[in-house]
Image (tube, rainbow, N blue to C red):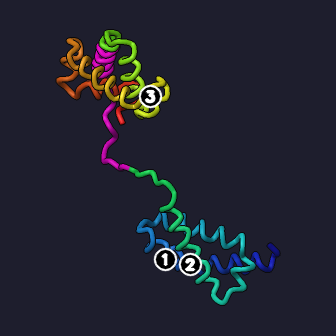
Amino acid sequence: MQAEEEARYQEFVRARWGHLVRTAYLLTGDVHHAEDLTQTALAKAYRSWRRVSRSDNPEAYVRRMLVSCNSDRFRKRRVTEALTAAPPERAGPEDAVSRADERGALLSALAQLPPRQRAVVVMRYWEDLSEAEVAEVLGCSTGTVKSQASKGLAKLRTYPGLAQVAGGPGLNRVAASGQGGSR
C-alpha cells in the first residue's frame, strides 16, 4: 500500500473506530468480542483497501465485512467457557486412593472375563471405540460386539470386588477412569 492510501486508511480507522465497535457490540453482546471482531474486519479491509476505498461508501463496505466476520465466528466450532465464582476443589489424597482401589477392583474383575469379552469391554468402554470400530478390530460382526459387551458387563456387575463400586457412581465411573467413557 502506498503512503497516501495508508494515510487514508489510518484516517478512516480513527474516524470510524467507535461506530464500528458499537455496531460489533450490538452483533456480539460483548465488548471484548466486539473489539476483536472490529479488528478482524479492519484487517481484512486493510488487505483490500484499494477496492474498499473506491466503493461509494467505505464504511458500509467495512460494516458488511463486520457482519460477515461475525457470521464466521458461528461457523467455527466454539469452545464454551464456564465461569465460576471460585476455583474448583482439588482432589485430595483420599480421592486418589479411592480411585486406585476402584481401578484395582476393575482390573481384577476384567481378568476373570473370557478373552473375547474382556477385549470387547476394554475397547468399547475403556478405549471408547464404537461398536463398529471394535467389530473391525476383532474381525467380527457388530452383533457379536453387542452380545459380548452385554455378557461382559453382566459378569462385571456380579463381581464381588465391584459390588461396592457399583453401589456408588457405578461401573461406568470406574470404566471412565481409564482413557475414555462409554459412547
Q: Is residue 65 left or right of residue 98?
A: right
Total tally of numbered discs in the picture: 3
Tell me the crowding category of disc 3: few under 14, some 14 to 19, or many 20 or more residues within 10 angstroms, Cα based: many
The crowd level at tag 2 (other Cα within 10 Å; few <14, some 14-19, many 20+) is: many
Q: Secondary structure at mark 3?
A: helix
Mark toward the viewer: 2 or 1: 2
Q: Is residue 87 magenta?
A: yes
Quadrant assignment for the C terminus: top left
**Residue farthest along the bottom direction in this orientation:** 56
Mark 3 residue type: Val
- Residue at image position (48%, 63%) is 33
**Label 3 with label 1: CB-CB less than 8 Å:** no
Q: Which of 64/127 is in front?
A: 127
Alpha carbon of mark 3 to alpha carbon of mark 1: how far?
51 Å
149 vs 73: above or below: above
Q: Which residue is mark 3?
A: 134
Is the N terminus in the top left, top right, bottom left or bottom right quadrant? bottom right
Taking 31 as reference, is 118 left or right?
left
Residue located beneath label 1 in the image: 23
* Circles 2 and 1 in contact, beta carbons < 8 Å: yes
- Residue 63 badge: 2
- Disc 2 on helix, strand or loop? helix
Task: Give the residue at x 35% y 12%.
Answer: 114
